[in-house]
Image (spheres, rainbow, N blue to C red):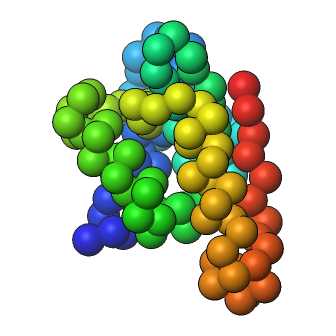
């Protein structure tokens, strides 16, 4: 189930900037989105920031809650970069909190998450 969801998200990842719709662009992923990552935009009260995060965050309960909110607010057929309805700092706090958990990567409490901002 999660694999199917992740596959659908990866297919829809694209740059925020509009471009000509062509069949060739449907599967294009921006250069800063490496394999195993996806792009997320936090949007609330006029604040907007783009993050590139690891797929591992799809198991984070707080992040999954944001995805539910995004589905309710924007629908489940988002194309391109995934938008979540929260302030950028709120998303950053969720990502940082998950990163510092001792059971996230190799049980060491440290992972290789370095958010990329645009």
Front one among 88 and 35:
88
Across and down, in percent, residue 78 comes to 31, 32
Q: Is 2 on the left or on the right of 28, as rendered?
A: left
**Residue at the (71%, 69%) spot, across then down:** 100
**Residue at the (79%, 66%) spot, across then down:** 112
Rendered position, 111 above or below 55? below
Does residue 64 appear in the picture of this structure?
yes
Q: Quadrant of residue 116?
A: top right
**Residue at the (63%, 48%) spot, across then down:** 93
Residue extending farthest bottom: 107
Does residue 29 appear in the picture of this structure?
no
Rendered position, 70 above or below 11? above
Across and down, in percent, residue 75 comes to 21, 33
How many numbered marks appear? 0
Q: Quadrant of residue 37?
A: bottom right
Front one among 86 and 106:
86
Q: Is 56 on the left or on the right of 21, as rendered?
A: right
Question: Where does the C terminus fall, quadrant-wise?
Answer: top right
Q: Is 36 on the left or on the right of 66, as rendered?
A: right
Across and down, in percent, residue 50 comes to 62, 30
**Residue at the (63%, 84%) spot, across then down:** 103
Question: Where does the N terminus fall, quadrant-wise?
Answer: bottom left
Across and down, in percent, residue 82 comes to 44, 36
């Amino acid at each position: 189930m999660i694999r199917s969801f992740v596959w659908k998200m990866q297919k829809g990842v694209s740059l925020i900037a509009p471009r000509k719709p062509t069949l060739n662009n449907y599967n294009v992923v921006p250069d800063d989105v490496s394999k195993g990552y996806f792009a997320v935009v936090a949007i609330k009260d006029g604040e907007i920031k783009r993050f590139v995060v690891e797929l591992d965050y799809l198991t984070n309960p707080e992040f999954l809650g944001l995805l539910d909110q995004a589905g309710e607010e924007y629908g489940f057929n988002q194309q391109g970069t995934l938008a979540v309805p929260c302030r950028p700092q709120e998303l950053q706090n969720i990502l940082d909190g998950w990163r510092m958990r001792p059971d996230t990567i190799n049980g060491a409490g440290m992972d290789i998450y370095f958010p990329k901002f645009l």
